[in-house]
Image (cartoon, rainbow, N blue to C red):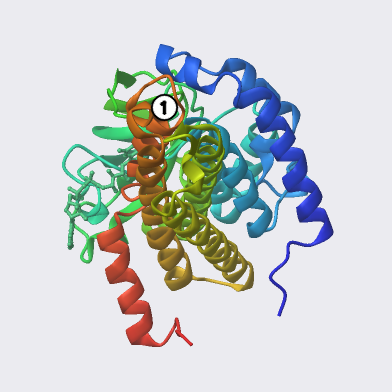
Amino acid sequence: MDFQLDDDQREFKALLRSFVDKEIVPVAREWEQAGRYPTEIVDGMKAMGLFGITVPEEYGGLDLDPVSFALVFEEIARGWMGVAGILGSHSLACRLIAMHGTEEQKQAYLPELATGVRRSGIGLTEPDAGTDLQGIRTTARLDGDEYVVNGAKMWITNARYANPLPVLVKTDPTATPAHRGMSVLLIEAGTPGYEVTKDIPKLGYKGTESCEISLTDVRVPVSQLVGGVEGRGMQQVLSALEWGRVNIAARSVGIAQRAHEEALAYAQQRKAFGQPIADFQAIQLKLGELGTQVQAARLMAYWAADAVRRGRADGATGMAKIFCSEVALQAAIDAMKVHGGYGYSTEFEVERLYRDSILMSIGEGTNDILRTVVAKSLIKGETRVG
Ligand SMILES: Cc1cc2nc3c(=O)[nH]c(=O)nc-3n(C[C@H](O)[C@H](O)[C@H](O)COP(=O)(O)OP(=O)(O)OC[C@H]3O[C@@H](n4cnc5c(N)ncnc54)[C@H](O)[C@@H]3O)c2cc1C
């Protein structure tokens, strides 16, 4: 057994860490609180090729293995989780196009998505359907060689920069089961009737926008149907979401790691009753537990990422996403407690970790839903424990 990263992965992780320490850590708190878009950080990520992490090399991408993919999200989230969001759904969109797109679609979009000249996101959720994706109401009716799309999308991260945006639609709203009538269309920004109507105000996950989109008689050429065949949309989306769960597990590890670092440093510097609070056993219990949980979460995220490398891994990625996101939240709360009153101040990093960590148990499938996904995988014998 090998629980170590290989040499390339270690080197890559060190490179990411130094980028984050130099470009993200010093500005994260101020920019996040000011609601400033991190343009300079995006430029840095472009220069490192990070917009191409899930794009095959033949289209100009880095085509990272899933463990290295996880390292990107772990390290960036350690600096500022919201910035990881800029790469998150972009990378899923690239993967979706790379895995399921026609050759024409890959040629048209992947090279520019890989460099960040084009950016993307993923449009699934609607005002009345999130977990229940088969309940979406957005329709795409064929009219000659165009689809006419009507509906609305909700919570779409990167919506203001996405071009194209893969959008889940019903090409046959009468199909049963519903997923047989669902497809993904690549809708280009600027298409008449496609409008980003609102940035949704959020508790955390700042630095990237999450928006409402309205779709009114949007005419989309049939050549934009992912894979060129109707009825495969759910399956295409679900296969991309598997990487999405690794992404969230890894972001959670990054948040938890930062919480651990902040708590450890503060405990050694803050004095009470004439000694560093790190000398008190009650604080040591928190530090010991925090370090243990972070390291366990990290191993679980890498294990799930490696399972994806070997094939479809709903159970492993679900387990990792549940566990790591819950560790992130607890780590943030414990780090705030170690900081006493200052943990509650917006002048310290830990309150942002707390606000950002909560999203980790919601995005890419709520943890409760994923518990049922894991259970089904265990019952079918596709995932084994032990
Ligand atoms: C900041 C942010 C960014 C996001 N970015 C994107 C994005 O880029 N693209 C995108 O498409 N979506 C995005 N989402 C949407 C996200 O994926 C959904 O919020 C999530 O899937 C849950 O859907 P919902 O909010 O409609 O909740 P619901 O589906 O209404 O769920 C509400 C509650 O009911 C529970 N529940 C639902 N069904 C069941 C069931 N069968 N059994 C037991 N419990 C159940 C859920 O676990 C949850 O606790 C984002 C959300 C947020 C908050």
- The residue to which callout 1 is attached is 159
Q: Is residue 117 above or below residue 111?
A: above
385 left or right, relative to 341: right
Q: Relative to residue 133, is residue 223 depicted above or below?
A: above
Q: Residue at x 35, y 73 (%)?
A: 374
In percent of width and height, residue 186 lies at: 46, 37
Residue type at the position of mark 1: Ala
Work out whether 140 lies above or below 204. Answer: below
Residue at the (58%, 71%) spot, across then down: 307
Disc 1: CA contacts within 10 A as few (<14), some (14-19) or many (>=20) = many
Q: Can residue 231 be seen?
A: no
**In-front residue for pair 76/182:** 76
Q: Which residue: 40% across, 30% down?
A: 352
Instruction: Say which quarter of the image contains residue 25.
Output: top right
Residue 313: x and y in percent read 50, 71
Instruction: Give whichever of 328, 206 is nearer the camera.
Output: 328
Residue 39 relative to residue 175: left or right: right
Disc 1 CB within 8 Å of nearest ligand 1 atom: yes
When asked about the image quadrant of residue 166, the answer is top left
* Side of 141 relative to 14 (left or right): left
Q: Position of residue 165 (x, y in %)?
A: 45, 34
